[in-house]
Every structure is written in structure tokens, then in C-alpha cells.
Image: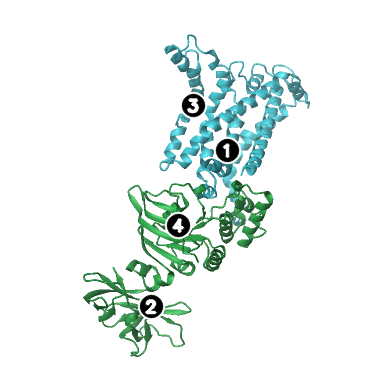
Amino acid sequence: MSSTIQNIYFRSDQAKAYTLLSPALILVILAMAAPMIVMIFTSFNTQISMIEIDRTFTTGRYEDFFSKPIFSMLLFRSVKISFFVTLLTLLTTYPLAYYIAFYVKKNKMLWIVLMTLPFWTSYLLRVFSWRVILGNKGVINSALMGTGMIDEPLGFLLYNQAAVIITLSHAWAAFAILPLYVSLDKIDKSLLEASYDLGNTKFETFWRVTFPLSLPGVIGAILIIFIPTVGDYVTPQLVGGTDGRMLSNMIQSLFGRANNFPLGAASAVLMLTTVCLIAALVTYITKKVSMRMS
Amino acid sequence: MSTKNYIKIKNLSKSFGDVEVLKNINLEVEEGEFFSLLGPSGCGKTTLLRILAGFEYPSEGEVFFDDTNVTSLPPNLRPSNMVFQNYAIFPHINVQRNIEFGLRKENLSKAEMGERVENALKMVQLEGYENRYSNQLSGGQRQRIALARALVKQPKVLLLDEPLGALDKKLREEMQIELRNLQKSLGITFIFVTHDQEEAMTMSDRIAVMDEGNILQVSPPREIYHNPKNKFVSQFIGNINILDADLKSVSNENLSIEVDSFGSMQLKNYQQIIENDKINIAIRPEEITISKISDSNYDYNFQGNVKNISFYGESTYYYVLLNNSEKILMVSKNETKEPFSENDNCFVNFNSNNVKIIKD
């Protein structure tokens, strides 16, 4: 009996694959799928007192979400901030990745490691360091005041959406560099030469060959930055002020002081849906556009 | 064929760091010529091609296309197009768009563009492949698309970097003939880089044999085969027996030499050998005959013993150890009904006019 089972196991590639996957699979089920299901169920319930939740099915929380403009406004702001974070990160990291992939001849790995070096410190520390840089007594203000260029600290540097965008872009840059670098480094250099040879300038070659071929990396970078930053609540809390508050801060308080788990869950579900839709749309549009360009 | 020199390369050198990969190259290629750069890997042939394409700039010297100095012209402004060794078909666009890729700048109408692409595909016999992608094509098909993509630009010069290297033998031989026919019908100059001497021989009008950054000889295939200028060329092209020779006496017409396996020989001095030159003699295997008994029709006969036999179908190679020395001679013979066997005693015979004199 056991020998037949063994036999089946060794003959089946699928069985072997599942065995290898099982630790990760169990973790994902317990830590992701299960909480997600609980959250979706909770979003259809009603909080009736501090500790009591009415478990009867209702879509009331979703109606609450859409009837109070603050929620939609915060969701829109979350998406907007993440959009600019993604854009800024791409604009700053793409040239770096391009440089390493095409111009660095040796020790490429060293360059990559050096660029990701700042990201070995804690996320929180990096967010705080931006407070140190942007704050009233921070590096920029003291430098400007020290040189006499301004008399009072520039208040607009910190506690607004721009501060959130700068801080988040910096915090996620390392995650963008890696997929961009990998996709650029993979491009066969003779394709670029073929493009020059066929009459294109370097600039045209970039848009007709290099960029379309790096799209998997670009899409990867977009998703890797956009998805987590929409839900970030630490950075807006520390550097965002009231102007920089995002939907995630609202969700956090609904599960905390505001104590409305079902409404928090409904907000989270709606945010998740929005992110998924945008991610799918981005992937689709980028592919279409790249086909057009070349 | 016109004899106008389309490409002129003057005193060209190229170094990468301390390594000089091309040393004072001077070369002229005629318009409409099928010209091959032949040499072992690392001889500089690909670098020379890349300089012609504009991907590399020479450290010294100049390149002219049709009397215009193009030395510092970037690849996109040169009247040349290239077929890459790995074909470099753009993977993100289909065959149609690959072929159109170089035409976008030429302001063609949609109909003209379509016609050019269609003709190009017809030329390489791949009609109906417009919507395929690179990963849906075989090696030979990719090779044809690369060819079509370059030729659709109607270049003055087509540069080919070992384009047949990745194909299997049968397909390679077909493509050799096709390429040659294509070149003849289009009448444009082909510069063909290869390390395969057979390929160069079958296709080219002229061949430049290169080694270590130098051009050793530029001649038509037959001339290179029958009259190699030095030892390297003679050994690189075809099989050959090379023997050391000592110069005994020399005049304008005649040479008297001593070869340690053959004894003294009298030869015509067709290579302008002068006193104190170091020379070798060489004989092609097919210019030696092998027989059971000494054949008095030939100037030289030596007794030997068959050591090894390689059968190639249309011919057989015998490796014959000469009795009076340690030297093994390579002899090829058309396949007959009475072949020799290993360890057979035999005679090898050849005429003095088949003995080539080669400077060291």
C-alpha cells in the first residue's frame, strides 16, 4: 500500500510541486485568505455597542461609506497620493536602473547593493529622517536660515501631501529599482544596435525598443509601489498632518478609537477592490500603449 | 561587373584598452562584390565589420563609402544595414512591424510601405508570416526575417555577421546558395564575416583572410586555395601537408631546396624567394596519389605505410607514414572499389609543379 503511494508520489510532478509549496501555502491561507474572508464577512455586519456586533447580513456599511463624502474623498486622496508616489519613484529610479544596466560594466551587483543600502534600516527610521530633513528645525530650514536666505522656517515643507509623497517615494525606491534593473539588464544589446542600424537615433531607439522591452519591469515597479502605498498609514500619520491623512488612517481609527469594525472592514474591502481594478487597468493600458509606440 | 571601389578602408587601427585588435588595415571592396572576412575567432573580423556599420569607431584611420568619409558617421546615417549573428529580431513586435521598423523615417504611404514589406517577405520566401512573433519562428526563418528587415531599407552595403553560424548543416548550405543568388540579383555589396572557410569559399567573389588583427591575403577563393601567401593562410583554407625546407641555392627562376623527408628538390621560384628567406613547402592532399606500386609518371615517389583512414563518402583521406622519416602525409583519394586498408604498404606520388612554396 505504502509503496503504491510512494510510486504515485514519485511519478507525479504535481504532487512534488504541492509538497514544495505547502509551507508557503499554509502560511498564505492562515495569514491572508482567512483574515480576508473574516474581513469580508464583517463588512456586511453592524456594530451595535462597544463590544457587540450584529451578525445579520446588511449592506448598510457600504451605504454609509458612500453617503458620507469624507470616505470617498479620502479614498480618492489615497489613490492620488499613491499615483504621484509611483510616478515620482519611477522617474527617479528608472534612470538609475538604466545607468546600471547599460553603462556599468563591472561590479553591477555592488552598485545594486549600494543603492539599496539605505533601505536596510527600519522603515520607521527613514520616515523619521524625513521629518528631520523637512521639519521647522530640520536640515533644509536651518540651512536656508543659516545662510540668511529666509528669516522664518518654511512651514510648507512638512505636514502636507507633498511630504507624504516625497517620504513614500524614497521609502519604496529600492523596490522599484530591482524589477526595473532586471528587465533592462535582460535586453539584448544587439536589439539596440539593430535599431540604430535601421535608422533610429538613440532617443527613438529608447522609445521604440528599450522602453517597450522594459515594460514588464515598469509594470512590476508600478504594482509593487502603488499597491502597498495606497494602504500605508504610518507615513501620512507622521509627516502628513491633517492635509495628508489617507483612507488607511480612517480605517485604522475605525478599528481603534472610533470602534466601528464593520465600517472599517467595508472601507478596507472597497480600497482593496479599487486597488485591484487600478492595477488591472494599469497593466492593460501599459501593454496597449507599448504596442502602439513601437 | 563594375570595378568601382565602393568601400575604402585606409590605415585603420582599433584598440580596446591595451589590446590592438586591428593593425593598420587597408582594404578596398568593389561595388556589387560578395566580399568575405575570414579568420579564426578573435582575429578582428567582427570588429572590422562593426566599424563599417558604425557601432565602433576606429582608433586611427578612415573609412570611405563611395568616396565619402563616413568614419565618424553614426550607424543610423550610414547607407549600410546589418544582419546580426543572433538575428536581433525585436521580440515585442510581429514580423510585419519588424520589417517596417527601418522604414518609418522614409515617409512612405501606407500602400508603398505594405508593398515594400510584401516584396521583402517574398524575396526571403516567407509570405504569410506577417503576424508571427520572433518566438514563433525557427532559426532559419528568423535569419530570413533579419535579412528581409535589412534589405527592405535598400542599402548600398549589406553587412552580415556570421549569419549562418547557428543553422544546421543542410539549411546552411541552402542559405549559402540563396544568399549568393540574392546578392547577384540585387547587385549590392555584401560584406560577409565568417570563421567557416568552406562558407567563404563557396559564396565569395573575394576573401580577406585575417589573423591577429592583420589581413594576410585578399584574393578570389581559387587563388587563395591554390596560391596561399603564407603558412597561416594555407593551413586555414582546406587541408594541406606542410614540410620544413632548407634553401640551398636560389636564382630568379629556380630554387634548390632540401626537405628532410623528400631529400633535395628543384622548384620554380614563383614567389620571389631571395636568399636567407625561411620557407616551407606545401602539398594539398588531393594532389598526391596513392598506389600499390611506384608510379613512374610522377616526379617524386616515396614508400610508406597507411596508418589511419578517414572515410568521407566522396573521398577518403589516408594518413601515410613515410618509410624514410617520421613524417605523416595526408593523401585524399576519390572513393574506389579497391581501397587501401590500415597497415598496407603503399607509394605516394606527386609532381613538382604541385609543390607550393610558402614563406614562413
Q: Residues within 10 Å of mark 1 (few under 14, many from 20)?
A: many
Q: Residue B193 carries which label?
A: none
Alpha carbons under labels 2 and 1: distance apart: 61 Å
- Which chain is mark 2 on? B
Mark 4 element type: strand
User: Which residue has dot 4 on it?
Assistant: B7
Q: Mark 1 is on which residue type?
A: Val
User: Which residue has dot 2 on it?
Assistant: B285
Q: Mark 2 is on which residue type?
A: Pro
In the drawing, does residue A180 fall left or right of residue B112?
left
Residue B40: x percent and y percent?
40, 61
Mark 2 element type: helix
In the drawing, does residue B313 fall left or right of residue A7?
left
Residue A200: x percent and y percent?
54, 45
Q: Mark 3 is on which residue type?
A: Ser
Residue in the image at 60% along x and 27% along y: A84
Mark 1 element type: helix
Alpha carbons under labels 2 and 3: distance apart: 76 Å
Query: Are marks 2 and 1 in one subunit?
Result: no
User: Which residue has dot 1 on it?
Assistant: A218
Of the residues tagged 2 and 4, which is closer to the observer?
4
Mark 3 element type: loop
Quick one: label 2 or label 4, which is nearer the N terminus? 4
Q: In which quarter of the image is residue B288?
A: bottom left
Residue in the image at 29% along x and 77% along y: B327
Of the residues tagged 3 and 4, which is closer to the observer?
4
Q: Mark 4 is on which residue type?
A: Ile
